[in-house]
Image (spheres, rainbow, N blue to C red):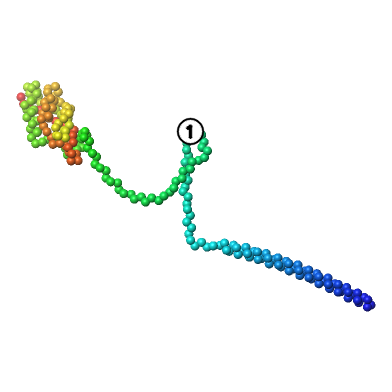
Amino acid sequence: MSYNVGEMAEKESKISEIAAIIVFLGLTFIFAAFHKFQTEIKLDSSVSDEIEIEKVEVTEQVKKTVKPAIVRIPIAVEDEEELEEDVELEIETADFDIRSEPPPPPPPPSVAEDEIFDFYAIQEKPELLPGNSDKITDYITKNYPPLAKKTGTSGKVILKFVCSKEGVPTNIEITLEKPADMGFGEVAIKAIEQVRFKPGMQRDKPVPVRMSQRITFNTTR
């Protein structure tokens, strides 16, 4: 019986040692696992710290430089040849301070030396000088066509001419002679050559003017 008791005590001692070893191994495993978990937590916290450091508040406005626009212009090629690459034309935009000012008034048109004005388009029309109307009457009375005077025929002539810058009738032509072939036209031309005009004026300068004059012939038998 004493042998059994001693054997049992020896068995219990071994069991206690085995249990102690198992407990020690379990604690070691738990400690290693806990240490690893702490390391991962620290790594995660360091990552979060780095992210927080990168967040910087911008307090100043950043001016961005805009590059000028690039316009591609197609270029026609003879014989349908293709260009190896497109030609790029850079157009730089710039600010301009444009102040619109009214244009100066145009200068008055100059009067050409040889320009002839119409009677109704002139500023100051030519006028017979005083006493020149009587010169026409006196000349017609003295030079009345003989055939018309003999037959007591009256007549009418309309002349067109250019009153020169000196007021002299020039380029005289007959536009109407009634009746014709009795000499009224020739007498009328000679009569108008006897007179002088005050020349027409355009912008305070004497200019040649186109005119017409009617001359009437009357006689009694």
The picture quadrant where one finds residue 200 is top left
Work out which residue is located at the far bottom of the displayed protein and give it. 2
Above-or-below relation of 61 to 175 = below
x 50%, y 40%: residue:
86
Residue 215 falls left or right of residue 29:
left
| Mark 1 lies on residue | 78
Residue 153 falls left or right of residue 114:
left
The picture quadrant where one finds residue 122 is top left
x 93%, y 76%: residue:
3
Image quarter hosting the N terminus: bottom right
Residue 4 is situated, as x and y percent measured from the top left of the image, at: 92, 75
Residue 94 is situated, as x and y percent measured from the top left of the image, at: 41, 49
Q: Is residue 211 visible?
A: no
Q: Helix or strand or loop: what does disc 1 sit on?
A: helix
Residue 120 is situated, as x and y percent measured from the top left of the image, at: 19, 36
The picture quadrant where one finds residue 39 is bottom right
Name the amino acid, label 1.
Answer: Glu
